Amino acid sequence: MINIKLIGGAKKSFNSDELKIDESDISINKILELILKTKPENTSNIDVENILIAINGCDSSAMDGKDTIVRDGDILSIIPVIHGGASKKLIFEIEKKQIQILEIRGKKEIDIKLIDNLRKNYPKIKFQVISSNFILNYSHLKKILSLSINAEKNKILLSNKIETDILMRFALTLQISNAISSAGMKPSTNFILIAIGNKSYFNSLYSELSCSCVNLFSKNNELFLKKCFNISKKHIDTVYSKTPLEDILVEKASILIWHTSLSLFKT
C-alpha cells in the first residue's frame, strides 16, 4: 500500500487530501498514471510537469526523478509548484543538476557582497541573482535555466560561466554589462536567487536566508516585460499558444546563441 498526500491545489483536483493505492515497487510515473485515472471529471486539472514530489519527505528530484521506485508503506507527497503563491523555495532537477530557487526581499543594505559571501561559504554551489521583475513565472524560469544548462552541456555557453549565461538570457542581451545593469541585483528590489549544485547544502542555505525570503512569483511582471523588451500586442496575438509572452521570451533567449555565431562569422 502506498499513501499519497495531496497538498495545496492538488487537493482540489481530487477532492481529497489523501489517496491510497494498493501497489508496491512502482515508479512515480506509473503512480501518476494511476491516480490521474481516478481524478473526478469536474475538478481542476493538475499539471504533472509543474509539481514537486517527495517520498517520505525527500525530494524525488534528488533521487531518480519520476523514475524513482516507490515501495510498500512509503508516503508520497504531491505539491503543485505554485499553490496560491505560498511557496518560499523551490527545489527541482534539470539534466541531473539540482537547483534551489529563493526570492529575497530587496533592501538598501543588500548588495553583491551577499552573493560573494555565499560563493565563499558554499564553494560547491553556483549562484546567480536575477531581478524578480525579469521573471514571468516558474515555467519561464525553468525553461531559461534549461537553455543555459543544455548550452553548458553542449559547450555553447554565451559566456565562460553558466552563471553569466543565465543572466544574459533573462536580460536578452549579449552584453554582460547591460545584463548586469538591467536584470542584475538592484537596491530595494526583490531578486531571485538561483543555486545550482549539491542538494545537501540547500537546507543550510535556506536556513541562512529564510528571514529575508518572500513568496515566490507573487508579482505579475507581464506589463514590465512587454515594455522592457518592446513586445507588442500584435506580436503576442501572432503566437498561437496558451502562454504567448512566455514563449516569446524563451524564443528570444534561445536564439541569442545564433546572434553570437553570426557575429563570429562576420568577423
Image (cartoon, rainbow, N blue to C red):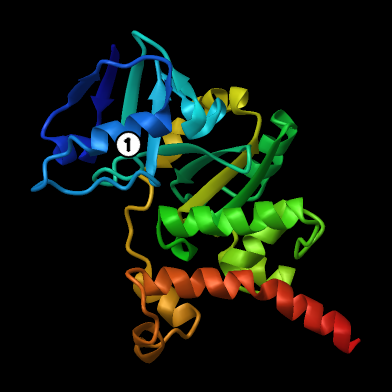
Q: Nearer the viewer, residue 66 or 247?
A: 66
Q: Residue 246: percent from the left, percent from the top?
A: 43, 68
Q: Residue at x 48, y 49 (%)?
A: 107
Q: Which residue is mark 1?
A: 33
Q: Which of the 4 image quadrants contains residue 184?
A: bottom right
Q: On the rendered structure, is 182 left or right of 79?
A: right
Q: On the rendered structure, is 184 left or right of 241?
A: right
Q: Which of the 4 image quadrants contains residue 212?
A: top left
Q: Residue 205: percent from the left, percent from the top?
A: 56, 29
Q: On the rendered structure, is 106 left or right of 199?
A: left
Say what secondary structure mark 1 lies in.
Answer: helix
Q: Residue at x 19, y 23 (%)?
A: 18
Q: Residue at x 32, y 53 (%)?
A: 218
Q: Sort mark 1 into few (<14), some (14-19) or many (20+) by Cα contacts within 10 Å.
A: few
Q: How many numbered dots are placed on residues in this image?
A: 1
For residue 144, above or below residue 225: above
Q: Residue 66: percent from the left, percent from the top?
A: 47, 33
Q: On the rendered structure, is 167 left or right of 102?
A: right
For residue 12, above or below residue 225: above
